[in-house]
């Protein structure tokens, strides 16, 4: 377990990088009940904080004592690029009215699934897993990330604001396409479909 600590820290730093930048994109005022970085300071500071978090993440990743640094960097970089692509799709979907549940599922696999898959795959590499084991860990991470994002979408509508730490219904107000909204749109008929 101690061999994977530096890679785990790297993934957490990458995750925080994505959250800082995501909050800027979403114009979010709070995260976990506290002001976001750009809200507390400004967007320029938040962008720089995110950049430093990402650079520090790579530094920590290269301190890992298991697996080869080349393989770790390949998996980490692919995860980062997929997460960023997922975020770009999320933003693009806000401007579209024809997003399908299938497209949404692909977006959350990138945005959230690849973050968790990066962690599980790195763990497999550091633990000297076979190709089959590492692939199974990657698949598990992708599915767990998808499930997490759907749960987060539901919490956005149903959670107690004191427990949730951010504005309940914020995704709807921002025009985000979520599993709940897209499923309702696919199942609705008549007037209800037009409203959704």
Image (cartoon, grey):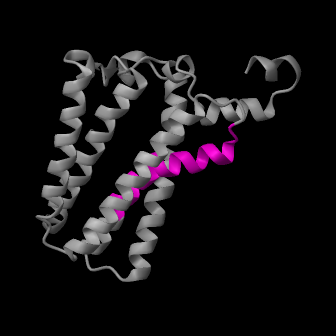
Q: Quadrant of the C terminus?
A: top right
Does residue 193 appear in the picture of this structure?
yes
Please say whether residue 35 is visible from this viewpoint: no
Question: Residue at coordinates 30% horizontally, 19% vertically from top-left?
Answer: 33
Relative height, residue 111 to residue 92 (above, below):
below
Q: Please check the rendered image and state whether residue 54 is part of the magenta-colored stretch, yes or no.
A: no
In this view, the residue farthest toward the front is 44
Question: Residue 22: horizontal and vertical position, in percent?
Answer: 37, 33
Q: Position of residue 136 (x, y in %)?
A: 45, 71
Relative height, residue 24 to residue 50 (above, below): above
Q: How many marks?
A: 0
Question: Image quarter for residue 183?
Answer: top right
Residue 72 left/right relative to 157: left
In which quadrant is the N terminus drawn? Answer: bottom left
Q: As drawn, which residue projects farthest toward the bottom?
A: 130
Whether residue 111 appears in magenta in the rendering, the answer is yes
Q: Measuring from the top left, give residue 26's x and y in whole percent.
A: 42, 25
Q: Residue at x 41, y 16 (%)?
A: 161
State the image coordinates of residue 7 (x, y, percent, origin top left).
Answer: 20, 60
Range covered by the magenta-colored residues: 99-120
Residue 124, compared with residue 77, is above or below; it is below
For the stretch drawn in magenta, the main secondary structure is helix
The residue shown at (43%, 53%) is: 82
Compared across the picture, whether 146 is left or right of 2 comes to right
Which is more toward the observer, 86 or 141? 86
Check the image and report above or below for 136 versus 181.
Answer: below
Q: Is residue 3 left or right of residue 150?
A: left
């Amino acid at each position: 377990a101690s061999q994977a600590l530096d890679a785990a820290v790297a993934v957490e730093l990458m995750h925080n990088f994505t959250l800082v930048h995501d909050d800027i994109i979403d114009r979010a005022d709070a995260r976990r009940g506290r002001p976001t970085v750009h809200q507390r300071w400004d967007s320029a500071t938040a962008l720089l904080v995110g950049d430093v978090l990402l650079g520090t993440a790579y530094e920590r990743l290269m301190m890992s004592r298991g697996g080869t640094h080349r393989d770790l960097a390949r998996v980490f970089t692919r995860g980062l690029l997929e997460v960023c692509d997922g975020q770009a799709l999320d933003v693009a979907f806000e401007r579209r009215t024809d997003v399908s549940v299938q497209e949404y599922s692909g977006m959350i696999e990138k945005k959230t699934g690849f973050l968790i898959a990066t962690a599980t795959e790195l763990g497999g590499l550091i633990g000297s897993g076979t190709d089959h084991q590492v692939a199974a860990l990657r698949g598990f991470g992708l599915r767990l990330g998808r499930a997490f994002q759907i749960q987060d979408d539901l919490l956005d509508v149903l959670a107690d604001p004191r427990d949730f730490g951010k504005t309940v219904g914020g995704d709807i107000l921002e025009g985000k396409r979520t599993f709940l909204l897209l499923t309702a749109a696919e199942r609705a008929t008549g007037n209800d479909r037009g409203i959704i």
